[in-house]
Every structure is written in C-alpha cells, then in structure tokens.
Image: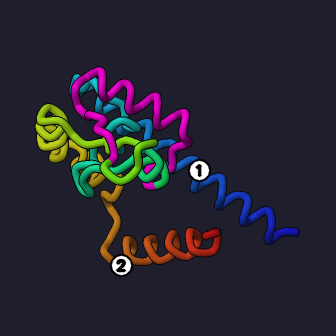
Amino acid sequence: MQEAKLYSRYSFLLDRTARRVKQYAKQRFRELGWAITVDQWAILKQLADHGPQNQRELGDKTFKDNPTITRILDLLNDKDYVERKPHPDDRRSFLISLTKNGEQLVNECLPEVQKIRMKAWENLSQKDFKEFKRILDSIYDNLSI
C-alpha cells in the first residue's frame, strides 16, 4: 500500500510538471506577442520537421484527438499558416502542409521556443538529463499499447 502512495505521488509530480511547462510556454508566447497557442505550435513544428501529413497522422504524433486537431487546423488555416490539399492516394483525406507564412513563423519562433525549453533544464547536469530521459522512456514503453 505504501508503494502505491509513492507511485501516486510521483504521477502527480509528473502531471504537475507537464502542466507547469505548458503554462510557462503559454506565458512566454503571450509575452512575445505571438498569435498562436502552444498546441498550434506543436502542429506547426510537426509539419516543419516531417513535411505534409494527413490529419490523423498529425493527431497521432501530437497526441490530439480528431475534434481537437480539426479545430487547431481550422484556426491555423484561417491564419494562413497551413493549407489542406487533396491527398493524392486517398480521396477521403487531405494532406496538411505549411504555407510560406507558416514556414516563416516556424523559423521566427524556433529560437525562442528553444530558449523556453532550455529554461526547464536549467541547473540539471548532463547526467541528470540522461537519467531523466531514461526514466521517461521506460514509463512510456511500459504504457505502450
């Protein structure tokens, strides 16, 4: 029973930390005057890193359900950061890609996003980081379906 309480406490700490990271990024985005959210950034970055994808792939890779990814893509499309084109191999889906404006936004935001991420790692050694990564990878693998 004591062990279950300990694991529960660690799960709480993990959730709390993930929320703090997102809150910090959200605050910095606002301070920087960016007209995108953290979730919108995740989609833009995914497209910048991996090229055009269909909506399902984007949702899977960014851990967003279909209604959420649809809403985010609609907003990004309205801002002219992404575009939907018919999928050449599947008439029922679209390929989502960055527009020139989307590419420019990613390039402008990336240095600041990297600074935001590095803030979380302040005061941690390389050894700390490697151990933390190993632990997170183990938790993720334990829960893989």
Tell me if residue 31 is in the magenta stretch: no
Reading the chain from its start, which is encountered first: label 2 or label 1? 1
Q: Which one is in front in this view, the residue at disc 2 or the one at disc 1?
A: 1
Residue 11 in the image, given as x and y percentages of width and height: 65, 58
Q: Residues within 10 Å of mark 2 (few under 14, many from 20)?
A: few
- What type is the residue that disc 2 sits on? Lys
Q: Secondary structure at mark 1?
A: helix
Residue with the mark numbered 2: 127
Asked if 60 appears above or below 26 in the picture, the reply is: below
Q: Residues within 10 Å of mark 1 (few under 14, many from 20)?
A: few
Q: In this rendering, would 16 be left or right of 86?
A: right
Here the colouring is: rainbow
- In the figure, residue 23 lies in which quadrant? top left
Q: Residue at x 14, y 31 (%)?
A: 101
Is the residue under label 1 in contact with that under label 2 (CB below 8 Å)? no
Q: Residue at x 32, y 61 (%)?
A: 123
Q: Nearer the viewer, residue 104 or 7?
A: 104
Tell me if residue 86 is in the magenta stretch: yes
Q: Residue at x 49, y 53 (%)?
A: 60
Residue 140 in the image, given as x and y percentages of width and height: 56, 68
Asked if 128 appears above or below 15 in the picture, the reply is: below
Specify start and end residues of the magenta stretch as a single range.
61-87
Q: Residue at x 27, y 54 (%)?
A: 118
Q: Secondary structure at mark 2?
A: helix
- What type is the residue that disc 1 sits on? Asp
Asked if 15 appears above or below 105 in the picture, the reply is: below
Q: Quadrant of the C terminus?
A: bottom right
Residue with the mark numbered 1: 15
